Image (tube, helix red, strand yellow):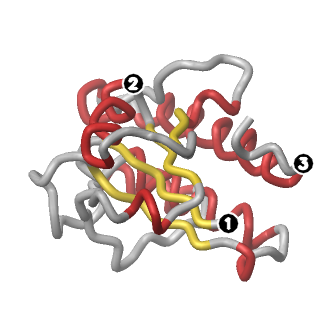
Amino acid sequence: MKILFVCLGNICRSPMAEFVMKKMVAEAGKSGEFLIDSAGTCEEEIGNPVYPPARRKLEAYGIDCTGKTARQMQKGDYERYDLLIGMDAGNLSAMRRICGGDPLGKMRLLMDYTGRPGNVADPWFTRDFDTAWKDIQEGCEGLFTALEKGAGRA
């Protein structure tokens, strides 16, 4: 399963989701079954590392994101990945624009995999990394469970 997590700049939410999901699949002994990456919909942060407060939040849970730098989502990502998971409705709209739509139904919001669909809180604007962490953790757990049940697109 190839999963691309997407947010605006690829320095907070999407890399947090990328590394949380990588840890989950590794702990389940399924790393070889997954390719997990992240990207942003804008070009402003290209090449920048994970934002320090996001990196520190990951480190607090034993997750290392060393070497990750922001990249912009490209149209070709639609063919490359099985699922493209946006963090909020604005990301989803931009993802559809970049890819020219979603004819195969590969695009979803991360929070759709929880009991409280909606947007992942954006800590870049709120500075609330605890809420973003909670949303991302819950969303990744729900996504992983759905994939285990064979319902990753549901």
What residue did someone put label 2 on?
A: 89
Please, is residue 60 above or below residue 121 in the view? below
Report the Cα–Cα distance between label 2 and label 1.
Answer: 23 Å
Please, is residue 55 above or below residue 118 in the view? below
Q: What's the residue type where badge 2 is placed? A: Ala
Q: Residues within 10 Å of mark 2 (few under 14, many from 20)?
A: some
What residue did someone put label 3 on?
A: 149
Q: Residues within 10 Å of mark 3 (few under 14, many from 20)?
A: few
What residue did someone put label 1 on?
A: 1
At x 47% / y 29%, what residue is drawn?
A: 120
Tag 3–tag 1 contact (CB < 8 Å): no
Report the Cα–Cα distance between label 2 and label 3.
Answer: 26 Å
Which label's residue is closer to the chain start, 2 or 3?
A: 2
Which residue occupies the extreme front position in the image? Answer: 103
**Image quarter in which the N terminus is found:** bottom right
At x 69% / y 33%, what residue is drawn?
A: 113
